[in-house]
Image (tube, grey):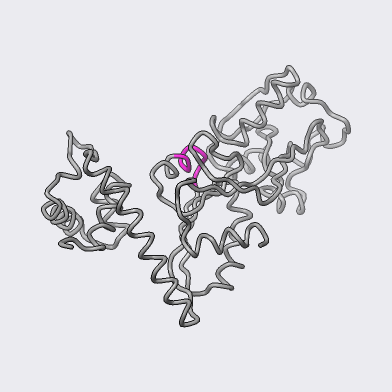
Amino acid sequence: MAYSLRQLQIFREVAQQLSYTRAAEILNLTQPAAFAQVRQLEDHLGHCLIERLGKTLYLTQAGQIVLKAAHRMLEETANLDMALAELRGLARGRLRLAAVSTAKYDIPARIGAFSAAHPGIEVVLTVGNREELLARFLRNADDLYILGTPPEELGAAVERFAENPLVVIAPSDHPLTRKRGLTMRDVARYPFVMRESGSGTRLAAERCFAEAGAVPKVRIELGANEAVKQGVIAGMGLSVLSRGTVALELRHGYLAELDVHPFPIIRHWHVAWPEAKRLSLAAQAFLDGLMGR
């Protein structure tokens, strides 16, 4: 074999990032070094793998074929390293997780438990919104994906592992905090601070309003749960968020959970991965932990 696994690793990162500069930063290389390794791989294979049109990189047909093979070969290599390490009683390797931003309040504790049981495994967690995770899913950039709504349209294997109740929140001094049996029409009279369009939390909230024949008054859209919480605390409006996201603020009285039918809406956390993907030993161990197996 005239090419190396290192060259495949560098090519895979460049292909996923579609940027020599970003790939080099991730791999702790210089940009010229990353470019040279990909060029050497192309020379060995006798095919152009990446072409540049203007300022944008594109995978050629050969590049797409090699990228799929690189994923398989590098994953098998990682599994081999871990399997041999386990024979010595020491598991090592890397686990790549991606989670929607709402899950960042729950997942760190689970990663902590996993790391305590498998101290030799490096865990890399990427946090983003749903659209960002689906894009990563399509690129096969990670081992496992944590989402509220599973990516059913993408050919995913999915497991449900925990409840994720959504609640309506308000500033602690809001007049609705003293009322019981509120309806969606009641809260629709007040302004709302919402997550950005496309987020799973917002989609669930809009579905509740639509089913009640009401429309929320969206005063402002914010792209992060922390910003939404601060907006509600500041009196900018009501909101719908995961109870886990606001647990600390509810406990200390900065926010209040409103008694609104049909809330709390019991959603669930799901872990997903491409159904054709063979999970690494580290990913399988983390999955087993999530599922209590």
Please identify the residue farthest to the bottom as the structure is shown.
Answer: 88
Residue in the foreground of this view, choosing between 102 and 77: 77
Q: x, y percentage for residue 72? A: 35, 55
Report if residue 275 lies within the magenta region.
no
Q: Is residue 170 in view?
A: no
Label total for image: 0
Q: Residue at x 18, y 63 (%)?
A: 1
Q: Residue at x 58, y 40 (%)?
A: 150
Does residue 126 appear to the left or right of 210 in the view shown? left
Residue 47 locus on image (x, y percent): 14, 46
Residue 188 vs residue 67: left or right? right
Question: In the image as oriented, which residue stretches furthest toward the top?
Answer: 213
Q: Please report the bounds of the magenta region as a residue range.
A: 128-134
Residue occupying the point 30% across, 54% down:
70
Viewport quadrant of the C terminus: bottom right
Q: Per the image, is 131 magenta? A: yes
The location of residue 213, given as percent across then percent down, is 73, 17
In the picture, measured across the screen, residue 240 lies left or right of residue 251, that is left
- Position of residue 23 measured from the top left corner of the image (x, y, whole percent): 28, 53
Between residues 103 and 256, which one lies in front from this camera angle? 103
Q: Quadrant of residue 173?
A: top right
